[in-house]
Amino acid sequence: MNHTKEHVPLLRHLGRGIMRFRWWIIGLSVLFLIGTGAFGAGVTRMLLLARFEVEGSESSRTGQLLEQHFKAGDPNLLLLVTAKNGTVNDPAIVNVGKELQKELETQPHVTVLSSYWDRAFAPALRSKDAKQAIIIAHISGTATEARELLRTLSPKFTRDLPGATVRVGGQDEIFRQVGAQSEQDFIRSDMIAIPLVLLILVLLLRNLWAGLLTLGISLFAILGTMSVLRILIQFTEVSTFALNLTMVLGLGIGVDYCLFIIARYREELEKGQDVQGAIIRTIETAGRTVIFSALTVAISLAGLILFPFYFLRSFAYAGIAVIAIGVCGALFPLPAMLAIMGHRIRPWSRRQQSTSVEQGLWYRISHMVMKRPVSVSVPLLALLLFLGSPFLRINFGTPDQRVLPPGVSSREVHEEIRLNFPAEENDAIHIIALNITDPQRQAIEQYARALSRVPGVFQVDTITGAYANGEQVARADEWSDRFVSEKGTWLSVVPSEERLNSDPFGLVDAIRAVQAPYPVQIGGAPAIIQDFRNTLLASLPPVMVFIGIVTFILLFFMTGSLLLPLKAILLNILSLSATFGALVWIFQEGNLSSLLGFTPTGSMEVSIPILMFCLAFGLSMDYEVFIMSRIKEEYDRTGKNVHAVALGLERSGPLVTAAAALMALAFASFSVSGISLLKMLGVGMTLAVLMDATVIRGLLVPAFMRLMGQANWWAPQPLQRLQRRIGFSE
């Protein structure tokens, strides 16, 4: 029942070409490694972390209008001045504050927005004990430009003066230090993961050369992708986290594909094939599976391109690149090296072979499951639903300084502001009204009073003065002139510390609900973050539909079945929901925080589950393809469903389990990251990969296929003819 005659010649010719030009392939591969290693090495300094702005959103336009018409902008830099003795009102500290403000104003691209020592009434800029005060500023330009400026600006303004200390904070300084920490974590993860993976590979494959080859192909993919990222930076922004993903995915995918190729090559040698025949047959079978597997993973990651955020798109670029280069490595230099090494790739020691395949562990497990499919599947489904139940309590938020480890300067600055200050003017909500000038000052005052009555509003500053709890608490002064220009006026709504930490989005909604006497636009940090979160969540359904439909189609062309692709998608969703539930329990609710070393925030950063969904969905399909290709191969040969499932799992189960364990090890290296977002991604992907390779593929797949029987392979006749004509099956 082999329906792929159109495809066999191409892959057979590829195998023959590899045999013929194997030394050329090795030579070009070595040059590729040297070239990409040299070219890609400089990429780490070019990557960046973006702000949370949604291009074209109301909050983004508000920030641009502030910069264009009012010489202001969204705060992204601050100086925290701490008096060593006395208070910030002491003459010596006042002089320090004023001198700092003057010096900061002379820096390129920096605009001082507000200073405690430049205003008659600024309680939000002074700590409750009067020992600390803040200068708030705006750095114009892109996140990349701000980060580069802060490389020199931050150490320049971090000072230990005779009477005071000065430290640098602000959103862009947090992002800069997250980027620096990410670079350190990249090196640390490499140092942990690569030696361990090599050791396990050598023990698993029982051959040093096989282990080195597998690791070499992983490095082939990683270095190649680093060069791709460096090229992409010339055309688009690329997140610093894309480098971390490149490392772990390159390591994991390289191992996956190499294990499958090497195992099939050894199997063909055991059947009595010579080296050339084994290479050609390996490319025809395992090579086809690797190509199809890579396609399914790439499709899942391509869903990230549909999000309107470059940092998610850069994950897609990095992921697709590392998969494409990894496939090329597995299909060209790896078989070329196998052809050169011949039989030397066999294990050092030959294990005792079972008298029959029926004595294999996975074969026996499969038969045990298929004898009691309901008894096995129902408790497992209940367990997965139980593990996923905390996901119902998920609270999406955005990261703050607590993503950084304790001791990092910007985290300490913002932690002290959160604990010691009555409000955070740095996170004020900005309201702009264009074409509003002096004749409507009374309307502005009434609007400001109404805004100041909103629960959680600490103070409202505007051209007519400052307001709190519906009352004017300070008259307009020279500083108030900043709120008006020939284009219009704007108001600054300073949230209380408590409301900002407990319900920032509710506060934005409450402010939007206050009736304005004229058309307004709302921005500032809480509104920016709300727009970011809402846009991400709104983009998620079409991405999920895209991934689901394309995956279904690809799996149909592989299996010729309508039921098996549906089964794969449903089991993937069930597995991922259990993983997300575990993440909520661990990270959002803070369980295991002491063990894993992070600070819980009571919310989940919204982009991490989205990235995990696309990544884990693709990797689970990777394992699905490996297993189903062997099951399908055996079913086409015998037409016996139960035997095909058991034998397919016996042939592929050990490989999938080993590949998943090594992939999990690579992701687990993120758990030592100082950045809680990377830690969350590492723990989540480790759980997802291990759960999928054991509970889902090892137990639920055979149970499901036993219950469905011959219906597993059913499709309408027109679709069967279509699949036979252009499908990917053996």
Image (cartoon, helix red, strand yellow):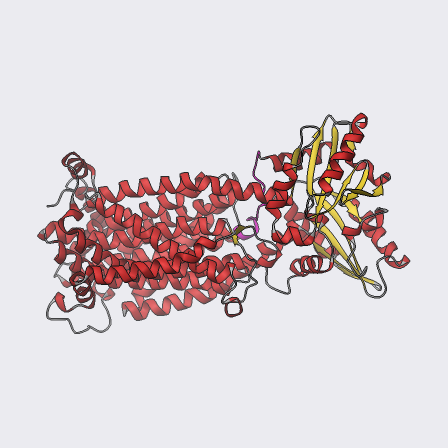
Instruction: State the residue in front, 348 or 64.
Output: 64
Horizontally, is 501 left or right of 157 in the view? left
Can residue 332 be spotted in the picture? no
Can residue 184 be spotted in the picture? yes
Dominant secondary structure, magenta: loop
Instruction: State the residue in front, 70 or 182.
Output: 70
**Residue 170: x and y, percent?**
68, 51
Q: How many marks?
A: 0
Residue located farthest toward the left when viewing the structure as drawn:
638
**Residue 426: x and y, percent?**
70, 48
User: Which image quadrant for residue 698?
Assistant: bottom left
* 395 part of magenta stretch: no
**Residue 589: x and y, percent?**
51, 61
* 48 part of magenta stretch: yes
Vertical position of residue 372 compared to residue 468: above or below? below
Vertical position of residue 31 compared to residue 70: above or below? below
Q: Residue at x 41, y 68 (%)?
A: 195
Q: Residue at x 33, y 52 (%)?
A: 572
Horizontally, is 583 left or right of 618 in the view? right
- Residue segment shown in magenta: 43-56
Residue located farthest toward the right when viewing the structure as drawn:
91
Vertical position of residue 673 compared to residue 543: above or below? below
Horizontally, is 215 left or right of 649 in the view? right
**Residue 629: x and y, percent?**
21, 51
Horizontally, is 719 left or right of 120 in the view? left
